[in-house]
Image (spheres, coloured by chain):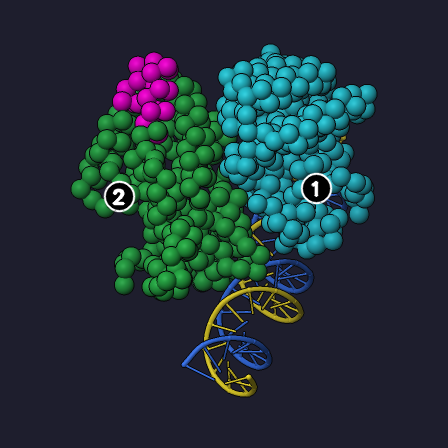
Chain colours: A cyan, B green, C blue, D yellow
DNA sequence: GATCGAAGAAGTGCATGCAAGTGTAATGCT
DNA sequence: AGCATTACACTTGCATGCACTTCTTCGATC
């Protein structure tokens, strides 16, 4: 699926940056800056952006700079619904079919999550997401894997937009419970645990329709005429940090 | 999602060609032939192929001509499993939320399917697929729509590889039943009907693991040493015609 | 006659160049 | 000063060109 061509390298880098929230929704991704950063031409950077756009991670607007996608609240909710069904399929497919070494790998991964509890939140989010992706990969079903991966990455974008501070503690024990049920071959219980886990994640993140950032302007619109506080954080962040993982020389020539 | 840029035009054309089985699994899609045909440069054709590859409709191999994807039997089965869950979400989301004009549109579409019964099989397949896509679009959920569309198009590829002659008669009445249940707002029944319908489609198409074409060579491999009948239809078709959507008549010849 | 190998053809991988569109800062006008 | 306008720099859209890889065909060899 992903080849070793240079566009895929850029894709992976950006995906990871998104996963670790080094890139946030709305961040700009200019083709030439990207190409420069990765030592390739705009052609390749452009190709990578097209790929990412088709995964829903990047928003492409004609004649305009590409942006990291900003999922709406409704999209985020709907995608968790999809994700629940997809990952139910994953654990069902896996039940009783996991080798000892695979179970070992998953257990080790969760141990890694445990170890990262003190560390950065970005790292915890990355590990948690990778757990789900790893599970999907073990099914050996390419399309299912692709969809779970895409939607899991999109989720991290949603969480960045709407999520409150991540608390991965419960998630870890839920991961363990899923592994245990899958290893025991109890498909129904595993599917139920996974669905519940994802519901919990969604609930912890943004169950109540709290429109943080992004939609703020719409919500404030009725009041906006009274005062003009400066359009809020959104615009500020966008211009402030323009692109890549690492620095990009101050705008202005 | 799809813009009016020229790459998207090529994408749409190829998607439609695949849907109508004017393009079959394994057909070659050379960049420059494609570009020539559509009056654009290789750059654009290449971009379109990348897009289609990310949708699973095209297979890209480094330094080699792109091919229309050839889903394996396992992939086809797995994708129908995914599709069932996805489309269950669709009808659930739609239940009781359909406007009169939308119901009218769906009913008209099914009438169109009815009218096409005497016509070409390709046309019936296209209409049946478009019914599902139309349903998904009505949810207004972009990600769900995208996945259903992708996987529905992939299904048509699977059907081309493994399906026996399509018999759309029962499918039409099943479509009607789904519309009726959705219009009535009976979510459980609608979901069940949709799931059953898709199971039926899969069953009619290839429930028994019949490896037609494509895998034929593998199956025949043990016997191949005895005789050399010329590698079958596959190689012949591939070299015979190199690319294009329109004007692809004879399957023999 | 069949097999192996090399040269040409066909095709992709990628960078670069130019035209057109977009945002922004400077300029002129009221 | 405030607003509209214009000019310019930035960015994308796309075609073309060149290098490299793969395929094919044809000739040499056994």
Q: Is residue B189 magenta?
A: yes
Indicate the position of residue B55 as horizontal and vertical percent values: 49, 42
- Disc number at residue A13? 1
Q: Quadrant of residue C4?
A: bottom right
Q: Secondary structure at mark 2?
A: loop
Query: Chain for mark 1?
Result: A
Query: Does residue A238 appear in the picture of this structure?
Result: no
Indicate the position of residue A238 as horizontal and vertical percent values: 71, 33
Identify the residue at image location x=55%, y=21%. A185
Which region shows up in magenta?
Answer: B177-198
For label 1, the crowd category at 10 Å Cα-Cα, with few meaning under 14, some 14 to 19 and many 20 or more, is some
For disc 2, the marked residue is B165
Q: Quadrant of residue B227?
A: bottom left
Indicate the position of residue A172 as horizontal and vertical percent values: 69, 19
Considering every residue shown, the one lying at the far top of the view is A208
Left or right, residue A133 beside residue B207: right
Identify the residue at image location x=68%, y=28%. A104
Q: Quadrant of residue B220?
A: bottom left
């Amino acid at each position: 699926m992903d080849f070793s061509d240079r566009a895929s390298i850029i894709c992976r880098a950006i995906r990871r940056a998104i996963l670790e929230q080094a890139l946030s929704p709305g961040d700009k991704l200019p083709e030439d800056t990207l190409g420069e950063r990765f030592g390739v031409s705009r052609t390749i950077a452009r190709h990578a952006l097209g790929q990412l756009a088709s995964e829903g991670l990047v928003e492409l607007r004609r004649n305009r700079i590409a942006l990291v996608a900003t999922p709406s609240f409704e999209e985020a909710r709907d995608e968790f619904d999809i994700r629940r069904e997809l990952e139910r399929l994953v654990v069902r497919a896996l039940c009783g079919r996991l080798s000892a070494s695979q179970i070992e790998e998953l257990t080790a991964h969760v141990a890694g999550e445990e170890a990262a509890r003190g560390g950065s939140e970005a790292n915890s989010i990355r590990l948690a997401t990778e757990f789900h992706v790893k599970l999907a990969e073990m099914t050996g079903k390419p399309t299912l894997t692709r969809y779970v991966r895409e939607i899991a990455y999109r989720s991290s974008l949603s969480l960045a937009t709407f999520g409150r501070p991540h608390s991965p503690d419960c998630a870890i024990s839920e991961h363990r419970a899923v592994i245990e049920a899958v290893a025991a071959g109890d498909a129904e219980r595993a599917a139920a645990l996974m669905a519940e886990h994802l519901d919990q994640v969604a609930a912890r993140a943004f169950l109540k329709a709290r429109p943080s950032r992004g939609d703020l302007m719409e919500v404030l619109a009725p009041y906006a005429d009274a005062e003009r506080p400066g359009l809020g954080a959104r615009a500020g962040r966008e211009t402030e940090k323009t692109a890549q993982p690492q620095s990009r020389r101050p705008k202005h020539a």
